[in-house]
Amino acid sequence: MAPRERAALVRLFGLIALLPLLLLIARRSVRLPYEPSLITCYGLAVLTGTAGLLYLAYTQYDDPAVRTLRRRAPGHETFPALPERPKVSFLLAVKDEVGNVGACVRSMAASDYPDLQIIVVDDGSQDGTGAVLDGLADELGITVIRLDRNIGKKAALVRACALADGDILMFTDSDCVLAPDAIRQCVRAMVRHPDLGAVSGHCRALNPHQSTLTRVQDVWYEGQFRIAKAAEAAYGAVTCVSGPLAAFRREAVYNYLPAWAEDRFAGAPFRFATDRQLTGYVLGQVWRGRALKQRHAGSPFVAGQDHPERRWLVGYTKSARVWTNVPAHWRPFLHQQVRWKKSFIRNLFFTGGFMWRRGPVPALLYYGHALWVLAAPALVFLHLVWAPLHWTAGLTALYVAGMLLKGSIWGLAFRFDNPGDRRWRYRPLMSLLSCCVLAWLLPYAALTLRRGIWTRTPA
């Protein structure tokens, strides 16, 4: 079909599919003047936000590796084009990952993309990871950088970037396995769209059958990428190019690598990898880039070549597949969530300062999500602690029912994208987990912001 006809038909079917949810929102909206309570407004906002995300993800998103994007960067014709087959530098930093690193590096080397440079940094491992990497270097011809002491994941990756000579810099995590065509799909998206400064792949769990917790996370990952990232990508404003598969144009990030490695927050070095922060440098360099480069003017990454600040798009390609080992037990899972919330807090003070400039829809998505996360602890306390103590258990039941409804809607979206996969039923459990457990981690993450290292607790 012609692009315009196809887009119109997709929007029509999207609205038809969302009709039950839209009718529920309309019914609550009509009753709002008669029930102007915080609970009614909150429930209406949650349902409206969910419907908006689904509409954007399923009617406005185009995979940039497959179709030409409908929305391009201002002046996209002036962005420098990539070569037809650009060189890719694939970078990995590891510490004490003897059990995972072999499968990860082999999947990198098994890529069907021809012009590939693989650089792995051993960041002071003490468990035999170095010996595994030495064997892989002899077998696969990869480059291994051995560091005598641990310097942190960001600094280790920047060491690798100093040797990388690719037109595209790609990153993955040591517990991930990539599809053979994952790199090619990311490259295809960026070659087709020179205004794409960064692209995120699509991640699922590598070990979904290990426990109930891994099944829940697998279904949740699908939604976070296929719906949340797709909605942001429809406007070229993905706010987190996630670590499992992240591709960056060299020109879009190279000058900002020293700022990333030496990032400080709350008066102390911030050692977490902060995928969000590196993405923020791509999204906001028109407004923040010059100051960052001046702060690190003596770095070879800045002094060597000054790339102009551009209003890059940041996208997501669902056809670039990657799988990651998700935590199978509660302790590593909670540690991971605390790390992510610390990165969220840090990034809020950076990306939050300019995201309103990216346009009304990207701003609404970003600040709406931030408000949801920040308000969650208070709302959970109100519904799950205060309400039962004041003999208003009906309020608690209504809140839990709302969370299950929201989770069921996301679960149905999972089933639509994955016909025959019965794991969609686990998605409501993630909604309950988010409100009953994960919401409480935000205050803890804020209070322990300076504490922590970048290595993962074994699953």
Image: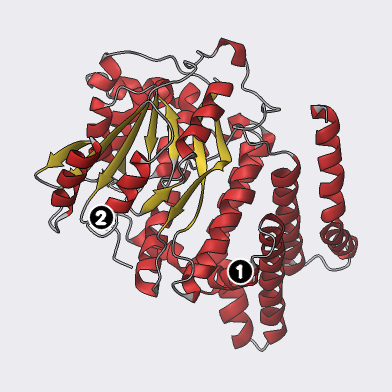
Question: Which residue is denoted by mark 2 in the rendering?
Answer: 453
Where residue 296 sits, quadrant-wise, is top left
Give the side of residue 115 with respect to residue 381, left or right.
left
Image position of 32 with respect to 77: above or below: below
Label 2 – label 1 distance at C-alpha? 33 Å
Q: What residue occupies the far bottom of the structure in this picture?
A: 391
Does the residue at mark 2 contact the one at mark 1 (Cβ under 8 Å)? no
Q: Nearer the viewer, residue 275 or 226?
A: 226
Residue 396 in the image, given as x and y percentages of width and height:
66, 80
Give the side of residue 390 with respect to residue 457, left or right.
right
Give the side of residue 277 with respect to residue 454, left or right.
right
Residue 199 in the image, given as x and y percentages of width and height:
51, 35
Q: Nearer the viewer, residue 7 or 103?
A: 103
Colour basis: secondary structure
Q: Give the amino acid type for the residue marked by disc 1 in the picture.
A: Arg
Q: Which mark is residue 423?
A: 1
Image position of 279 with respect to 174: above or below: above
Which residue is drawn at the image coordinates 56% and 80% (left, top)?
385
Which residue is drawn at the image coordinates 71% and 53% (left, top)?
49
Q: Nearer the viewer, residue 258 or 144?
A: 144
**Number of the front mark, 2 or 1:** 1
Q: Which mark is residue 288?
A: none
Q: Is residue 288 visible?
A: yes
Q: Is residue 193 visible?
A: no
- Among numbered discs 2 and 1, the one appearing first in the sequence: 1
Dividing the image into 4 quarters, which one contains the C terminus? bottom left
At label 1, counting other C-alpha atoms closer than 10 Å, the crowd grade (few under 14, some 14-19, many 20 or more) is some
Which residue is drawn at the image coordinates 46% and 20% (left, top)?
85
Q: Give the amino acid type for the residue marked by disc 2 in the picture.
A: Ile
Per the image, label 1 sits on a secondary structure element best described as: helix
Dividing the image into 4 quarters, which one contains the N terminus? top right
